[in-house]
Image: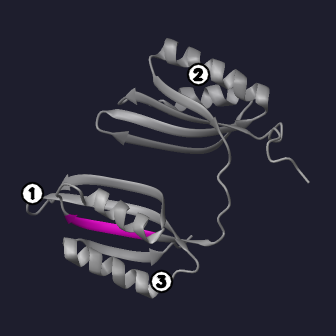
Amino acid sequence: MADPQQRPNTNENYLLISAFSTHPESPLLALSRRIADSGCNLVDARLSTVGRDVSALALAMGSWDAVAKLESGLGRLEREDGMRLVWYRTGPKPMQSNLLPYMVEVIAADKPGILYQLADFFDRQGITIENLHSSRYRAMQTGADMFSAQLTVGIPASMHIAALRDDFLEFCDHLNLDAILDPMKF
């Protein structure tokens, strides 16, 4: 029987990196170059402009020594390029074949706490939020402040989808949110 405390496979060491810079400078090019130069592979990445800043979130994988080389290179990148970086060792995302991927879209007049209430609803149901994008904008026709969110959620396969959809739509009606909950189409 394998010891659960043993070191991971020598080529499966993971480093999660958050990088921030001011728009229009993007941290993606410098970060992906450091990952490649260290001998690591870029497994997953996200890039987003939020406010006046650009953020990149990257998951690098490689041998133990390649990840150590990357960590050293990130320190230099932070000092030399003036980027803000945060990184730490992590592991791969566990497989969750019991979760069904669903898309949630919400649009409403903006008011404080909408995102918290959405997150709280799903948390109370035991549903994980896998991906989220939310923003605030002004409606073109009226100038009203609007809230928009797109979420990917993982719904346990044992959950009754029709009952969940009814509960979710009732929750949204109570908060005056226009929303949909549909299966993810790949």
Q: Secondary structure at mark 1?
A: loop
In the image, the segment drawn in magenta is 103-108
Q: Amino acid at mark 2?
A: Leu
15 left or right, relative to 115 = right
Q: Amino acid at mark 3?
A: Ile
The label on residue 102 is none
Residue for point 67% across, 25% down: 70
Residue for point 41% across, 42% down: 48
The label on residue 74 is 2
Asked whether residue 25 appears in the rendered view, the answer is: no
The label on residue 143 is 1
Q: Earlier in the sequence, mark 2 or mark 1?
A: 2
* Labels 3, 1: front one: 3
Marks 3,1: beta carbons within 8 A: no
The label on residue 161 is 3
Q: Secondary structure at mark 3?
A: helix
Is 40 located above or below residue 116 in the figure?
A: above
Residues at marks 3 and 1, CA–CA distance in whole angstroms: 36 Å
Q: Earlier in the sequence, mark 3 or mark 1?
A: 1
Q: Amino acid at mark 1?
A: Gly
Percent x, y of residue 61 = 70, 38
